[in-house]
Amino acid sequence: MLHMLAQGGVIVPLKDSKGRIEALELYNRDGWRIPTVEMLLFKKLKRKKAIASQGGAPYRITRRGLELVRSEFDNR
């Protein structure tokens, strides 16, 4: 998931009426929705400061997150 974010993807939180995050949607850089985003992984990435949201925008990868991404041969 971190590789998709590094390539330009975003995580869009879906909130309930109280403003709490109840579900997540991951979109790759082409706009396709990726169905497998778990809340535990999302919280882990937030705790490590690998992703952040600014001004109510979708969550994007941070500089710290880019440091955590391991390079892969087929990573474009």
Image (tube, grey):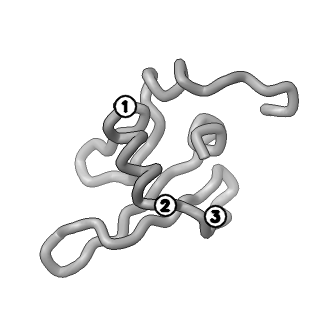
Identify the mark at residue 34; answer none if there is no mark.
Answer: 3
Name the residue type under label 1: Lys
Instruction: Name the spot of residue 35 as percent of width and height, x first.
Output: 61, 69
- The residue at the point 21 percent across, 68 percent down is 20
Residue 69: percent from the left, percent from the top?
Answer: 60, 27
Pick out the residue farthest to the left. Answer: 18
Q: CA distance from mark 2 to mark 1?
A: 16 Å
For the point 28% across and 72% down, the residue is 15
**Mark on residue 38?**
2
Q: Which mark is residue 48?
A: 1
Label 2, label 3: how far apart the Cα atoms are: 11 Å
The nearer-to-camera label among 2 and 3 is 2
Picture coordinates of residue 36, whole percent (x, y): 60, 64
Side (left or right) of 42 relative to 57: right
Where is residue 2, by image quadrant?
top right
Dots 1, 3 in contact, CB < 8 A: no
Q: Residues within 10 Å of mark 2 (few under 14, many from 20)?
A: few
Q: Residue furthest right?
A: 74
Q: In percent of the image, x 37 and y 63: which residue is there?
A: 13
Question: Is 16 on the left or on the right of 32, as rendered?
Answer: left
The quadrant in which the C terminus is found is top right
Question: Which of disc 3 and disc 1 is earlier in sequence?
Answer: 3
What amino acid type is highlighted by mark number 2?
A: Glu
Query: Who's the residue at 42% across and 32% down the image?
Result: 50
The crowd level at tag 1 (other Cα within 10 Å; few <14, some 14-19, many 20+) is few
Going by the image, does 17 lie left or right of 22? left
Q: Residue furthest bottom?
A: 17
In this rendering, is residue 56 above or below 48? below
Q: Secondary structure at mark 1?
A: loop
Identify the amino acid type marked 3.
Ile
